[in-house]
Structure formats: C-alpha cells, structure tokens
Amino acid sequence: MTDAILAFVHDAMASPWIYAVILGLALLDAFFPVVPSETVVVTAGVFAASSGEPMLWLVVLAAAAGAFLGDHISYWIGRSAGHRLLSRFKPGTKRRAVYDWATTALEERGGLVLVVARYIPGGRTAVTLTMGSTAYPVRRFAFFDAIAAVSWGLYGALIGYVGGMAFENDPIKGVILGVGLAVGVTVVVEVVRHVLKKRKARVPVAPEAEAVPEPAGTQR
C-alpha cells in the first residue's frame, strides 16, 4: 500500500502538470485556507531533493505566482464587497476576531502585516480582504504581496528540500519532516504573537498629568 502511494506521488511530482497544480492550489488558498497548498509545495521540495523532479526553482515560481494572483483576487473581493462580508461576522466569534486583528495590525504595521500574515492560520485571507475593504493603495499592496508570495514559495520549497536531503532514499519520511517543520514554524509564530499580545495588554496606561494650578497673582 505504501509503495503504491509512493509510486503515485512520484509520478504526480514528475508530471509537468505539477507546476499548474501548485499554482492553482496556492491561488485557491487565498479564499479557502483548508486547501493544502503548503503541504503540496513542501512535498514538491522533498522530491526535488530526492529525485530531481520537479525542478526546485519552478516549484518556487509556481507557488509564488499562485499566491500573488490569489491574494490580488481576494483584495479585489474585499474592495468590492468587503464591508458586506465583514458585517456577517458577529462580534465575539473566532472569525470576527481574526478580521479585527487584521484591521488593528494593518493600522500599526502597514503593508508589512501582509508578509507576517502569510504564516498565521487564516491571517492571509483576513488581511487581503481587509486591505481591499479599506482601499489600501494597489501599488503598495502589490509590492508587499510580492515579498510575501516569494518568501512563502521559498520557505515551503526549501523546507521540503531540507527534508528530502535528510531522507534522500525515503521521500515519505522527508515529507513528514518537511510538514513537521512547517507546522513547527507556524506554532512558534502563534506563540510569539500570543505572548506579545499578553504583554501589550499588561502594559499600564500612563495616567494623564494632573493640572498644576497657576500661582496666585498670575491670572489674567
């Protein structure tokens, strides 16, 4: 059974269509976070190291292109219907909390939040829709999104490549290692974000300076 699965995955990774699949999944991931685009990119990186197919640089290019296109589609959806979509998310729900975070983060960090959100579960969709609904400048969005898309493509493919080099003769273990590393990075990002959020909440707000009365005889 394992040999049959391995043979199927190997044939799929050796197909020239794998680049189109990677691009399509990375694009769809902008609207449906459950799409396993990152897992496919990591797997492609593993096989690029262990068998030479697919080609690593084309994996990175396909992943980055799909992410870039998908983010722009999500941005324009937010621009045209973002307020209606956000109105459906009731306060107090997890989904509304993600979009509230995206709004606050955008105000504090600007376009750089798009790069950070790439590694936060659900963050990519929330940020791109929010940036569209707030009419964030398209050129600036494209600039930061290019950085986010390329960094994500490199990250996924190279993590897979590391797994493939570690288990050159056993791609399945390489995939497990690669996916485990990717999940570990996501967990670390979430833990750091949670700690920073708690620290920020504990910072006391400086009281307003009390008004000092003017000395007698100085009133006008």
Image: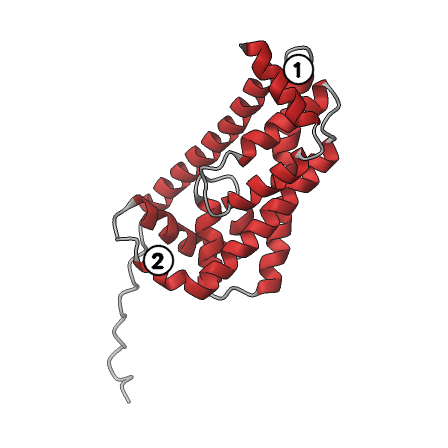
Residue 155 point in image, percent of width and height = 62, 34
Residue 26 point in image, percent of width and height = 57, 41
Question: What residue type is disc 2 on?
Answer: Leu
Under tag 1, what secondary structure? helix
Q: How is the image coloured?
A: secondary structure
> Which residue matches tag 2?
86
State the residue in front, 217 or 4.
4
For the residues bearing labels 1 and 2, Cβ distance under 8 angstroms: no
Residue 75 point in image, percent of width and height = 51, 58
Relative to residue 144, is residue 210 drawn left or right?
left
**Residue at screen point 25% across, 74% down:** 213
Question: What residue type is disc 1 on?
Answer: Ala
State the residue in front, 103 or 142.
142
User: Residue 181 — which label?
Assistant: none
> Which residue matches tag 1?
166
**Residue at screen point 71% across, 18% down:** 50
Relative to residue 92, is residue 38 drawn left or right?
right
Residue 167: name its quadrant: top right
**Residue at screen point 74% across, 30% down:** 55
Disc 2 crowd rating (10 Å Cα; few below 14, some 14-19, many 20+) is some
Under tag 2, what secondary structure? helix
Query: Would you say residue 172 is visible in this rendering?
Result: no
Observer-side mark, 1 or 2, equals: 2
Query: Would you say residue 129 is visible in this rendering?
Result: yes
Q: First in sequence: mark 1 or mark 2?
A: 2
